[in-house]
Image (cartoon, helix red, strand yellow):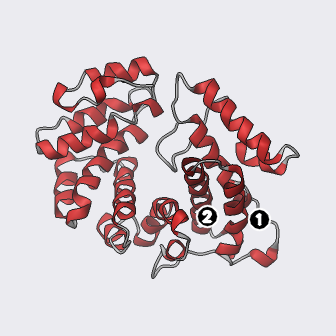
Amino acid sequence: MVSHPGYCFTTDATSWRPEKLLHSKGGLDQARAFCEYASKKLKFTNADAEGACYHGIGHGAVEDVTDPKLFGKPQAIIQPSLDLCKGVSDTNDKLFRCVSGVFNALEIVTSAGRYNLSLNRDDPLIICRTQPDKYKRACYTQMVVAVMHVTGDDFEKSAQILNTIPEDEWAKESLSGLIVELVRLNRTDYQETINFCRKLPRRFHIPCITGFGEGFLKYGPPQNEYVKAVDFCSSSLLTDEEKTACFGRILPILRIWYTIEKSQQICQSVDGAYRLNNCVYN
């Protein structure tokens, strides 16, 4: 499964665990070559193989800490991986995907209490606030699950915490990522979610709607993920603005799950008013 930054990706071609490549003698060049290979190998069935590969590289050193002197020091634990991401990435997008893997892994080991790490219950986003700007987006979006852990999956309280993110676009993207998780928890009542979205701070209203639609893609039944996503975005319960935004999110990312042909078929099945770029996919 693959998705936007942070989602897991597993196929035969990438089960080689790219995060381990940086520990072999091939080093950075081998890692880049592997990700390029994954992209070429899977480009017809999946458009995000290379990005997912870089995300995997970011996991590396964070999940393999052996020096006890680093225990309890989250920045010291992630810094080697951040440095590796900087070295292996030759574009900003690759850097973002790699760094998202770093913070994804940090959330996992912190929530599990490994390496004497623990979540900051007063501010689960504190590690993000101290990062350089080029890393903050990846950190905020990946630490959403940590926020959920702290609030006990209370989405209202989680949204309040995410509303403390000062950078508007990063806050909205993080909120959208939070709402994706409603589907994982089988909280999929359309009207209940729409009401919740409309009561959020104004900047979160539309990202909440789009996140719910995306959640069906991420957590739907294999090869039929799109069915509930399209159904929700088509719902008469939504305003035209909400429908436009919902389709504007789910249609562009169909290629993460499906072939060009299937993505086109799905796109062409929706109301023409909401189709993306005449359903043209690469």
> Residue type at mark 1?
Val
Instruction: State whether residue 70 is above or below residue 149.
Output: below
* Residue at mark 2 to residue at mark 1: CA–CA distance: 11 Å
Indicate left or right for 73 with 103 as reference.
Answer: right
Instruction: State whether residue 120 is above or below residue 106.
Output: below
Asked which quadrant contains residue 249, the reply is top left
Indicate left or right for 69 with 32 as reference.
Answer: right
As helix, strand or loop, the secondary structure at mark 1 comes to loop
Asked which quadrant contains residue 225, the reply is top left
> Residue type at mark 2?
Leu
Q: Position of residue 242 (x, y in %)?
A: 18, 46
Residue positioned 53% across, 21% down in the render: 44
Q: Residue 84: which numbered mark, if any? A: none
Count of numbered labels shown in the rendering: 2
Residue positioned 34% across, 31% down in the render: 226
Quadrant (top left, top right, bottom left, bottom right) of the C terminus:
top left
For this rendering, which residue is in front, 107 or 163?
163
Residue most toward the bottom? 122
Q: Residues within 10 Å of mark 1 (few under 14, many from 20)?
A: some
As helix, strand or loop, the secondary structure at mark 2 comes to helix
Q: Which residue is mark 1?
A: 65
Q: Which residue is mark 2?
A: 106
Q: Earlier in the sequence, mark 2 or mark 1?
A: 1
Asked if one can make out residue 238 in the rendered structure from this viewpoint, the answer is no
